[in-house]
Image (tube, rainbow, N blue to C red):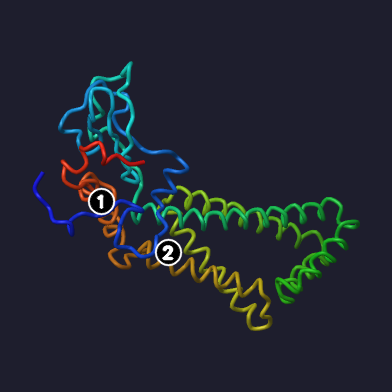
Amino acid sequence: MPSRSPSDFEYPPGTDPHRRRPRLSFELLGCAWNGHSLVGTDAATVGGDDALVVRDLDAERRLHRCLRCDAWTMLPVPAHPARPTPAARDEIVLPDRGRPLKSRYVLRLIALTRAFNVLVLLLVLAGAVAVLVNRTSLRDDLVANASSLQTVFGGQAIGQVQSVLAGGAGPLWLVATGVFVLVVLETSEGVGLWRATRWGEYLTFVMTTLLLVPEVLELTSSTSPGTIIGMVVNVAVVLYLLISKRLFGLRGGSSAIAAEREHDISWAALARHLPERSDVGAPGAASG
């Protein structure tokens, strides 16, 4: 390995001595939840080509590097190895790390808000169906509960709900159908975001942008806390998707996303976090 200066080395999460404040490491969070991602734990022997991720310390001990957080962990050489050598690089699926991993956590946080929306919509759908099944006895109770929420959601929205509930069964079937469609769309958003799919990001952007229209109209007649908080959250989601996820070709689009993944999730990225071989091969270099 060619000699490198200290400025060429990128410190693994939580080890940079020059940082005055510790920063949140999503790699460490991922390893705390899923465990380290190690290579060669079931191999009989390791060679020089495997030194990037696993090295023999002596005849009985081995150093394994986590592919996610870069921690070196000392483990015993397997007594009953399942394979002669570690898996080849093209057989190993590198875990998310760096900016793509951070993005995945943010997308999953947004997905959790969609899960909450689905829960609320299911309650509304259940209420509409309950009124349709026994409209006479349940309609008054549902209207009373809706009225009590005016201080949170605003008078205009609650007034529209009351108007629908006071009508016949036709409007309620329309409401139930609309809510069911929203449940399907919100569920699709959550699944797409949780799996970090591109279509999930676009669907979330479109749906969230459309939701901003009634929220802006609501602000013209009411400034309830729920409306303001919801609008702030939705604006933040739209801006994040546009800027950070580079939708519609913004800031390089999909090609820039692919380049970002290649920079942070690749064997070259692992090599950038590796000091001189003599520094890591020593017993005192083991960590984790």
Q: In which quarter of the image is the N terminus?
A: top left
Cα gap from disc 2 to disc 1, whole angstroms: 20 Å
Q: Residue 262 shows which numbered tag?
A: 1
Write the residue at 59% across / 53% down.
Answer: 115
Residue 39 left/right relative to 147: left
Type of the residue with mark 2: Leu
Residue 225 vertical position relative to residue 93 in the rendered view, above or below? below
Between residues 18 and 184, which one lies in front from this camera angle?
Answer: 18
Residue 132 left/right relative to 18: right
Decide which of tag 2 and tag 1 comes sooner along the chain.
Answer: 2
| Number of numbered markers | 2
Residue 10 rendering spot, x and y as whole percentages: 24, 55
10 Å neighbourhood of mark 1: few (<14), some, or many (≥20)?
some
Residue 84 rendering spot, x and y as whole percentages: 24, 20
Residue 25 rendering spot, x and y as whole percentages: 40, 54
Between residues 267 and 18, which one lies in front from this camera angle?
Answer: 18
Residue 57 rendering spot, x and y as whole percentages: 23, 30
